[in-house]
Image: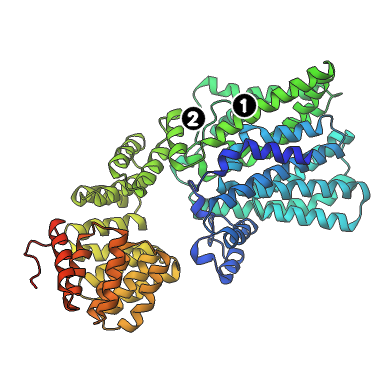
Amino acid sequence: MWVLIFTLTLIAYFPALKGGFIWDDAGHVTRPELRSFSGLARIWTEVGATQQYYPLLHTAFWFEHRLWGDSALGYHLLNVFLHATAAGLFGLILRRLAVPGAWLAALLFALHPVGVESVAWVSEQKNTLSAVFYLAAVLAYLRFDAGRTGRSYALATGFFLMALLTKSVTATLPAALLVIFWWQRGRLSWRRDIQPLLLWFALSATAGWITATVEHTQIGAQGADFTLTAVERCLVAGRAIWFYLGTLLWPADLVFIYPRWTIDASAAWQYLFPLGVLALFALLIGRRRQRGPLAALLLFVGTLFPALGFINVYPFIYSFVADHFQYLACLGLLALAASGLTRVFALLPRWGGFTAVATLLTTLGGLTWAQSSTYRDVFILYETTIARNPACWMAHNNLAMALADAGRLPEAIPHLETALKLRPGFAEAESNLGDDLTRAGRPADAIPHLERALQLQPGYAEACNNLGAALMAVGRSAEGLSRFAEAVRLKPDYAVAHVNLGLALASTGRPAEAIPHFSTAVRLNPDYSEAQLDWGIGLTLTGRFGEAIAHFEEALRLQPDSAETHHTYGRALASAGRTDDAIRHYELALQLKPDFAEAHLNLALALRQAGRMQEANTHYLEAMRLGAVPGAPVRN
């Protein structure tokens, strides 16, 4: 069964293995400044060093980056492996609890498409890894419950602590264990059932408090989008419960970002959702002889509780529901479904039962295959999201960012304009639109958008940096330099702003002041090739070419196929009198970019200095043809 689970999971998620990194992955895959051993220490000791304080998760990412670097395949393979492992552990737990259809439930969990968001998205390794620890803790605690040994309790507690340090939603586990014991025994004993879990409840409360604090103070789960009354939160919760039940039963048209409901306490029909949940509980409570359905519903709602709207979590700014919120919550209902289906299939002929199971699993696996295909890259993901949820301003903004990074600015700008129509006070879209307009050669048009972004969010370092670039482009150098300095003040670890500030200082004749900013950028991001290159230029301009060589060489090591880097290094070598070395780098630049007009011109000048006049003439003529110079060819 384990082999079957792993095989079918790998097949169903095969399209996701071809995927790259998408939204939020940059906040989880270990950032350059955390990749050292001191960075690993910061992951554990510094709240705010990582996006959320999940130190065990980010330790796992730290080791993974050492294993496969920035290759997304390794992360995707591990996520599939962890999901399949969680499914196997789920089957073992149900067998230990003597639940009929244990392995069918494991296969349902492995192949159900609501799991795709957690498995195909690198950032959600927090779900798959924490699920493995969560289920290992359940298995170990059930062993403790049977034998009452200190060793089994310590093992179970260790697994639970690891789950909490990976994702705090696992804090619901001690309550889930009490539900399981009530289902088994029909009542709870203080000494046997509750007392041993008091430590776990304390650990849960601590983890929940830390996460809620970080969500509020650092991630930004506050403001107008989160100001819901108690009644409105109940309306959100009731509707969310039915939504999740619906997607479990009919997993069609799953979306990365679902439409955000408009909650209106004056609309009578919205109360039908929470009232329906209460009616369902009342119905199941009335069936005293059958505790299974009520236990499954309690596990479902209880595990969902942190994401039902009573606690602010940042994704609520986009939608009140997300598939990854019910990754653990669905386990109880899948166990109930498998138990019921097993009884139904037992009434069929043997071939009929086998056919029914195979059809069900094939259908789920096919849906998972199709859904995981949408996670192959950011373009497919956001285009699919927009097709299914046209009002998703976040998808329009993020798709525009991806298009801009790919150099497709004319396609990016309309998406940002759409995002601003859908959400007029969206500071990030204003900043991104300003940045794209600057890069498209329209800095004067960019400035109003960037100023608007800063009006909406005065401490927005990225908008400050982008405004600095626009101001520099229109010749307002002093103002641009001031904005770069402000961006660095607002966000001292903002490497790009340090580089821009350094470039602004150098362009105003202050290269010596620029060098510390290039140095800081490299310290913050050791793989920042442009910062290494600019550092080398700054040292060259201040007469320290000997020191600059190491930085030029490092820039080339990081970007060996960059024609611009070879060309810049060549100019520095030429200025230092190393003509032959300069010629070699100009030639390498032209091998990489044959139509590089400025490189042809500088190569011609270097060849002339070396006495190779015929070759110099050829490159000078080519530079003229490409528009680098208006003059005449070099004369012999």
- Whether 454 is drawn above or below 413: the answer is below
- Whether 368 is drawn above or below 221: the answer is above
Q: Nearer the viewer, residue 261 or 513?
A: 513
Q: Position of residue 538 (x, y in %)?
A: 29, 75
Mark 2 lies on a secondary structure that is: loop
Q: Nearer the viewer, residue 556 or 583?
A: 583
User: Would you name the residue on which mark 2 appears?
Assistant: 261
When asked about the image quadrant of residue 364, the answer is top right
- Residue 511 circle label: none
Q: Residue at x 85, y 55 (%)?
A: 153
Other residues around mark 1 within 10 Å, as few (<14) / some (14–19) / many (≥20): some
User: Would you name the residue on which mark 1 appears?
Assistant: 242
Q: CA distance from mark 1 to mark 2?
A: 13 Å
In terms of sequence position, does the residue under pointer 1 or pointer 2 come before the other? 1
Q: Is residue 363 left or right of residue 446?
A: right
Mark 1 lies on a secondary structure that is: helix
Q: Residue at x 78, y 49 (%)?
A: 137
When asked about the image quadrant of residue 567, the answer is bottom left
Task: Determine whether label 1 and label 2 are within 8 Å by CB.
Answer: no
Q: Position of residue 518 (x, y in %)?
A: 35, 71
Q: Nearer the viewer, residue 288 or 519?
A: 519
- Residue 344 appears in the rendering: no
Quadrant of the image containing the N terminus:
top right
Type of residue at label 2? Trp
Type of residue at label 1? Trp
Q: Is residue 262 left or right of residue 586?
A: right
Q: Nearer the viewer, residue 67 or 189?
A: 67
Q: Position of residue 325 (x, y in %)?
A: 61, 39
Other residues around mark 2 within 10 Å, as few (<14) / some (14–19) / many (≥20): few
Q: Position of residue 626 (x, y in %)?
A: 16, 56
- Whether 445 is drawn above or below 44: the answer is above
Q: Is residue 335 left or right of residue 270?
A: right
